[in-house]
Image (tube, rainbow, N blue to C red):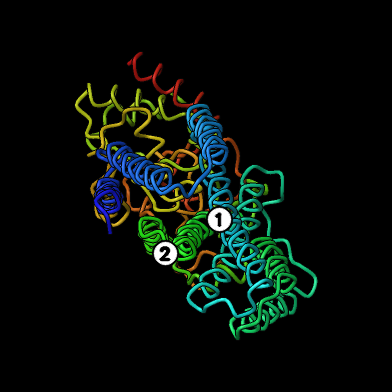
Amino acid sequence: MDLLDTIVRLVWLLGAAGFVFGLMRMNSPATARNGNLISAGGMALAIGGTAVLLVSNGSISTTALLIIVAGIAVGGGLGLYMARTVKMTAMPQLVSLFNAVGGGAAALIAIDDYIRLASVQSLLPGSIPLEVSIPTVLDIVIGGITFTGSILASGKLMGIISGKPIKVPGGQLVTLALALITAVAAIYLWAGNVSVPILFVIIAASLIFGITMVLPIGGADMPVVISLLNSFTGTAVAMAGFVLGNDVLIIAGALVGASGAILTKLMADAMNRSVVNIMIGGFGGGEGTVGAVGAEGGSVRSLGMDDAAIQLAYAQNVIIVPGYGLAVAQAQHAVRELAELLEARGVNVSYAIHPVAGRMPGHMNVLLAEANVPYPQLREMDDINPEFDRCDVALVIGANDVTNPAARRAGTPVSGMPILDVDHAKSIIVIKRSMGRGYAGIDNELYVNPKTGMLFADAKQGLADLVAAVKAL
């Protein structure tokens, strides 16, 4: 090993350390932006070190190098543009698309490497070593599933594809057949046989499997699906690292795969459902409409803007419960303005963040952080739930299933799902456009609670009117 090779490997190690440190910094909204920059810097070091090594060894032609540079410029420029222009409500869709790109790219690396090795083997007969064929096949399978599955998940979130579970005719049999075909084809290749047609059978089966896996899952489970596919992307990248013999790619992929798997488990636990149960099929997918009578025959009490303003302005403790309705209405700046106005009157304000309040993990935290809501005010579910008993007013903005007391009873679609204990507050104000149901497809029993006043309005406009009413007091 010469000096340059040693230096490059040290640079790779430094880049990998950047990944780890950056991931640690992402543990808090206050340091997440800095952690992202550190991780990006680690990747820049890894790419730069690899480029230097390839050029110095003469392993890459000038034409190939120019193509790589052009690809980085185009891809990086497009990624920068999308990241800067995307609305926060569309961030989950963008993440899904990035998952698709990552998984697809990793699979293409393995496909290209296998075809190249197969062409060499035709001239020099012999089997492809297991240490190459195993990660190659796994990379293609995981990457292919991630590619089509992520595109479908993004389509469901965009509304291009229905958010409701779409059953595939004979879905279980089709999925089982695809898994069996993939397993048999993989074993055939691992047994020492070299066959490009068999490889394409694996590719086709993996792509179809990604479709049959995500189609039956409802929109309510998309946060978990996105986390799982993110984990798949990392695992595919790690396999690509084994295929190429690149240590830093293995480390980066393993970190993404492991962190995505942990996040998937946490998200599933937050919904009190197993990952296997979610992958079998979701429990809902879109809002319906119901009348003014709740699940237990109670009646809904409508609340006037002035009455709501008086309750908030003269409270001591107010807990704001943001939901996806707030995100859709782009009301994060309006809710911060209301909170600041209440704080100026001596009201203690905090935010109750449910793990699945948005459409992807951490979505609501990022949305509120974008509006410069102070980080200490963002309280996770387990931390904030005991505070509802001492809360004067709970202000629910566009949140539905995560506040439904029906979760505490058996026999409902949300049974057992941990919820925010909003019904424990002394008074409850709900800002919602209508009595539409949430993703679970059932009435929210919170709305017929005698302590609840419904303020029917778009979240952004309703908050703006509340701000004006509080200022007028």
Q: Amino acid at mark 1?
A: Gly
Q: Position of residue 244 (x, y in %)?
A: 47, 61
Q: Quadrant of residue 218?
A: bottom right
Mark 1 or mark 2, which is nearer the start of the sequence?
1
Q: Which residue is mark 2?
A: 261
Residue 277 vs residue 382: left or right?
right
Residue 411 vs residue 451: left or right?
right
Q: Secondary structure at mark 1?
A: helix
The quadrant of the rendering that contains the N terminus is: bottom left
CA gap, disc 2 to disc 1? 15 Å
Does residue 302 appear anywhere in the picture? no
Q: Position of residue 172 (x, y in %)?
A: 71, 77
Q: Which residue is mark 1?
A: 103
Q: Position of residue 54 (x, y in %)?
A: 42, 47
Q: Residue at x 58, y 82 (%)?
A: 190
Residue 443 vs residue 237: left or right?
right
Disc 2 vs disc 1: Cβ atoms closer than 8 Å?
no
Q: Secondary structure at mark 2?
A: helix
Q: Residue at x 46, y 29 (%)?
A: 331
Q: Amino acid at mark 2?
A: Ala
Q: Residue at x 40, y 53 (%)?
A: 355
* Number of the label disc, if any, that sits on residue 439: none
Q: Residue at x 65, y 83 (%)?
A: 188
Q: Of residues 126 and 227, which is closer to you in this image?
A: 126
Q: Of residues 359 and 404, which is closer to you in this image?
A: 359
Position of residue 314 relative to residue 136, above or below, is above
Local crowd at mark 2 within 10 Å, few (<14), some, or many (≥20)? many
The residue sitting at the bottom extreme is 191
